[in-house]
Amino acid sequence: MNCNRGITAGIAVSVITVMLCAVTPGYAHEESGEDRVSGVAGLTFLSERNARGMVLEDQGLIMQGLLGINFQLTDNITLTTGVWTDIHNNNDGPGPDAAAAGAGVGDSDLENFYEFDWWIGVDFEIGQLNVLAYYEEFLNPADDLVSQTGGFESRHIQTVFTYDGLGDNMFGMDGVNLSPYVRLLFEMDGSVGPTAKDGIYIELGVGPSFTAIQHQTNPVTVTFPIAVGLGSDFYEDDETFGFLSVGAKASMPLPQLSDWGSWSLSVGVNAVIANDDAVGAFNSGVAGQSDDTRLIGYVSIGIGF
């Protein structure tokens, strides 16, 4: 099973994984007997919306929702589709000085509906290697400054390679998994980067995890996600290195809600260290921000069904 989708990630949360394991197309299947259709839904609250090193929002309430449906075609192949949304109650743009800099909502009645994404793709397994390939569109219903200046609305192809099982019994601990992955995003029409170019985004990541608290019904799993964002014709000044993200996350199942599906709760924090030469103009011009290092907290609740 592939649990990687990286915040940041994400589908659109691009500082690796902000929601629990389920924030990705390809959360794949919670197999139960002969069931061939499964799904996942989740809700995340964040202190900042940061995408691939770019500060998109850090004021007010930031809420993200996910609904994904998976159709298991064979034992190793799954068709996956779903939607992801990003809702902000602040309409003046990110940063305390963003409004003064000209940020804010364009001509739209959906001023809080910052982003809507949808995807469809195929997830398949080859031994312990999981490959997820999908077509995706990022849409900006609010029609705000980001879409007007940086492109932002985008149609692209993503491919994610994840290797499960690496790190088993590392340091003599049961259940350790490094979960290394490689994400490739090929822009087709519109950009999700800080420039208007159609480029390639590359993310290399690992998410060492282990069971920190053994409990019969509510074990706590701790994960330390690490990601490096790179690009080709993607970042400013043709910079290759975009950002480094390092974080910590604690997750636990909620069996008390098992009558309504497989629930889980996650809380975490990510430090995003951006390359100023790659995203500095965007962050200072659009977000009114100049800090290269951002600390982002989040809490997520999700359900698999």
Image (cartoon, grey):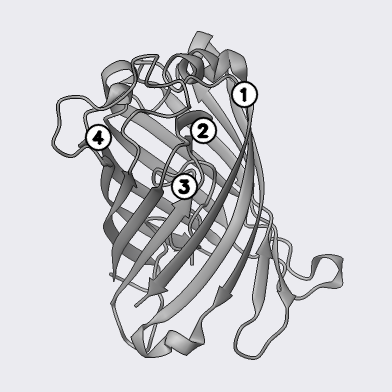
- Residue 92, compared with residue 87, is above or below; it is above
Disc number lying in front (2 or 1)? 1
Q: Which mark is residue 291?
A: 1
For badge 3, the amino acid type reads: Val
Quadrant containing the C terminus in the rendered view: bottom left
Q: Quadrant of residue 203?
A: top right
Disc number lying in front (3 or 1)? 1
Q: Is residue 261 left or right of residue 299?
A: left
Q: Is residue 190 visible?
A: no
Of the image marks 3 and 2, the number of the one nearer the N terminus = 3
Indicate the secondary structure of the residue bearing disc 3: strand
Residue at the image position 32 percent from the left and 55 percent from the top:
122
Disc number lying in front (3 or 4)? 4
For badge 2, the amino acid type reads: Ile
Indicate the secondary structure of the residue bearing disc 1: loop
Of the image marks 3 and 1, the number of the one nearer the N terminus = 3
Q: Which residue is mark 4?
A: 140
Q: Quadrant of residue 172?
A: bottom right
Q: Which residue is mark 2?
A: 202
Q: CA distance from mark 3 to mark 2?
A: 10 Å
Q: Mark 3 and 4 residues: CB-CB less than 8 Å, in contact?
A: no
For badge 1, the amino acid type reads: Asp
Q: Is residue 84 visible?
A: yes
For badge 4, the amino acid type reads: Asn
Task: Classify mark 2: residues with Cα within 10 Å, few (<14), some (14-19) or many (20+).
Answer: many
Disc number lying in front (1 or 4)? 1
Q: CA distance from mark 3 to mark 1?
A: 30 Å
Q: CA distance from mark 2 to mark 1?
A: 23 Å
